[in-house]
Image (cartoon, grey):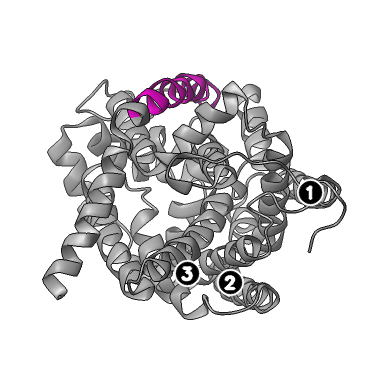
Amino acid sequence: MVDGPAPIPTLPTPRDRILSLDVLRGVAVMAILLANLPGFALPDPAYSNPVAWGGQRPIDIIVWFLTETFVNGRMRGLFSLLFGASTLLVIERADAAGGNGASFHLRRMAVLFVLGMVHLTFIWTGDILAHYALVGIVALAFVGLTPRALCWNAAAFAGLSMALGGLECLGLFAAAARDTPQMAALWDSYQSAFGTPPPAALAPEIAAMRGPWSTATAFRLEHNGNPLLDLFQIGPDTLSAMLLGMAAFKSGFLTGQWSRVAYRRWVLFGLGVSIGAYAVMALGVAASGYDVRAVTVVQLLLNVPFRLVGTLGYAALILLLMRPDGVWTTRIAAAGRMAFTNYIATSIMMTAIFYGHGLGQFAHWGRAELYLLAPLMWGLMLFWSKPWLARVGQGPLERIWRLASRGLAGKSG
């Protein structure tokens, strides 16, 4: 519902693209690097726990606190939000062209799953695409709902995610005694994910990532999570954001049709609540001495609702700042039109710096130094995306995705 007389202006873009979605997607693919840098450069538990590796200096802790407070969770949430919106858009346009939108969506998800598994296995273990493909299949069941019904379902799945996270936290607290081999193994598994395992426990990952590509790939094959298991463990959380994205698209929120007053309200509410909550949670983790229980409770339980409202707050802020005829807007929109390609290109660039098939810098840098790479990668995205699109019209991986999805249609027909 529009509140006030002045919606955010938009301009037509090539092939009837929606400028606001491209800009949001561009910001998301750039900003998610801030969250992912520890995943590229440091052992796995350091992603959530700064003192696990590379975070012992005050500057490292400050950087961790800032990324926790302002970035983590919400950029992935923005990606999920936009994935839900894009699902609706693709289905609607396929139906309008006389095709079967649902069938086309399922083919796209099949191709995305394959491409995501290639990324997960051969490039970087932090892939999210295969997971999105599986959750996207489930999301198809909700595309016909009204915005209000989508919001209620999003809230329900967020609640389910919190319930599952709460059960995991209870299991971790019960395992703290480590009075049986099973409880000790469970405790160690959480230490490996969210705690501070001893350096010897991290040595195999460090050696593999510094080694040749074949060694790193073998390590990923052995230690990668199961996407089907992730569908049940973190799928409800991802689905809640996708459904919220569908609601935001249907209501006009993501397409700039709300008034500036309404967007300002969402900025004040969404960012005020989420930034404050994330700051308190980060301070709580620090006060606990980065105890695995505190980190796990925050990551699996407490941050779920604040991530959703913070994601909407950031989306509203981006839409308010967007200037349809601005140089930065067109550059960021171009990066967003090539978000798939830029996402994979980021993985290739970062692993070339940190893995053994490149410069072999894995686990050599402190956390703070990692963020010097973000402006460089952003510059590359902004520099190459617009001229590439002007010449070719579509990103290389976006084209592969589209052609492969159409190819499946030909085989099924």
Place of residue 2 in the rendered image (x, y in percent of width and height, measured from the top left): 80, 59
At mark 3, the secondary structure is helix
Where is mark 1, residue-wise? 263
Question: Which of the two residues, 360 or 402, is positioned nearer the viewer here?
Answer: 402
At mark 1, the secondary structure is helix
Name above or below for residue 60 compared with residue 5: above
Q: Residues within 10 Å of mark 3 (few under 14, many from 20)?
A: many
Q: Which mark is residue 161?
A: 2
Q: Are marks 1 and 2 in contact (CB under 8 Å)?
A: no
Name above or below for residue 193 compared with residue 70: below
Q: Residues within 10 Å of mark 2 (few under 14, many from 20)?
A: many
Tell which tag, 1 or 3, sits nearer the viewer.
1
Question: Which of the two residues, 378 or 216, is positioned nearer the viewer here?
Answer: 378
Q: Earlier in the sequence, mark 2 or mark 3?
A: 2
Q: Earlier in the sequence, mark 1 or mark 3?
A: 3
Q: Amino acid at mark 3?
A: Gly
Q: Are marks 1 and 3 in contact (CB under 8 Å)?
A: no
Where is mark 3, residue-wise? 235
At mark 2, the secondary structure is helix
Residue at x 42% of width, y 62% of height = 90
Look at the image and tell me whether residue 327 can be seen: yes
Q: Which mark is residue 170?
A: none
Q: Amino acid at mark 2?
A: Ser
Look at the image and tell me whether residue 181 can be seen: no
Q: Is residue 328 left or right of residue 41?
A: right
Task: Tell me the quarter of the picture where residue 65 sits.
Answer: top right
In this picture, which residue range is highlighted in magenta?
Answer: 367-388
